[in-house]
Image: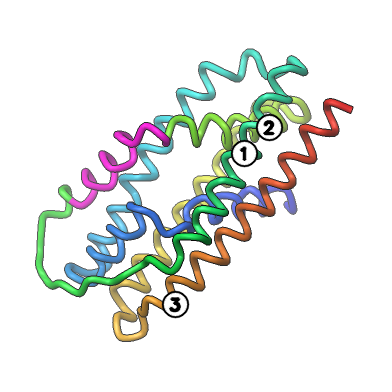
Amino acid sequence: MNVFLSYILLGLSLAAPIGPINAAQIDRGIRSGFMHSWLIGVGAVVADGVYMLVVYIGVVKFLDTEFMQTFLWLFGFFVLIYTGVETILNAGKIHLKHYRGKEPLLKSFLTGFFMSISNPLTILFWLGIYGSVLAKTAASYDAGRLILYSSAIFIGLLIWDIMMASVASSFRNFLTSRLLVVISILSGLSLIAFGMYFGFQAISILF
């Protein structure tokens, strides 16, 4: 159960940095309400799922080699550290734009999906992060556990989407740039912590 919860926390940490998707969620939540904001996130999660499936199909067969495991842990380490540091450095550049309006729910979903699927860094991000998770899980557990822990990452992503949509739509008066800066800094620190763990795993394999 502790391992399962740690993967949910990983999913939360991956979703928490204030980037294009979260910015779009905030914007839709303020303008159009909960469902529009939530569907932005759902679209992004579906795109993440596509990339996770690609990584699983293409990489899982080679994860039992020491070289591949070391590479994935190191790649995950660099991606997480870079993302965490960038998140903290850019925390002070967050601004809210208050608009009102309505649009089709499908458009919100497709916006989130295409924003994520068209980002060239997304596949590299998931190759490093999810590839690292596969390397660790495939070496220690069976396929059932691998699917279970992958689902935990999805749960973390969806929990964050619901939280963001709720905050943006239901607590508009309390949604300030300062609050977003705090969230961004905390998520950046969390990503750095995960990155350090990934780096430790790579060093353990090497030495």
Q: Nearer the viewer, residue 81 or 60?
A: 81
Q: Residue furthest bottom?
A: 173
Q: Earlier in the sequence, mark 3 or mark 2?
A: 2
Q: Which residues are magenta?
A: 108-121
Closer to us: 155 or 128:
128
The answer for how far apart the CA atoms under marks 1 and 2 are is: 6 Å
In this view, the mark in front (3 or 1): 1
Residue 207 % position (x, y):
89, 28
- Residue 129: image x %, image y %? 58, 37
The amino acid sitting under disc 1 is: Phe
> Cβ–Cβ below 8 Å for labels 3 and 2?
no
The three-letter code of the residue at mark 2 reads: Leu
Residue, disc 3? 179
Q: Which mark is residue 74?
A: 2
The answer to which quarter of the image holds residue 36 is bottom left
User: Answer yes or no: do the residues labelled 1 and 2 have beta carbons within 8 Å?
Assistant: yes
**In the rendered structure, which amino acid carries the disc numbered 3?**
Leu
Helix, strand, or loop for circle 3?
helix
- Residue 62 on the magenta span: no
Is residue 120 covered in magenta?
yes
Q: Residues within 10 Å of mark 3 (few under 14, many from 20)?
A: few
Task: Please identify the residue farthest to the right as the structure is shown.
Answer: 207
Q: Circle 1 sits on which residue?
A: 78
Residue occupying the point 62% across, 38% down? 78
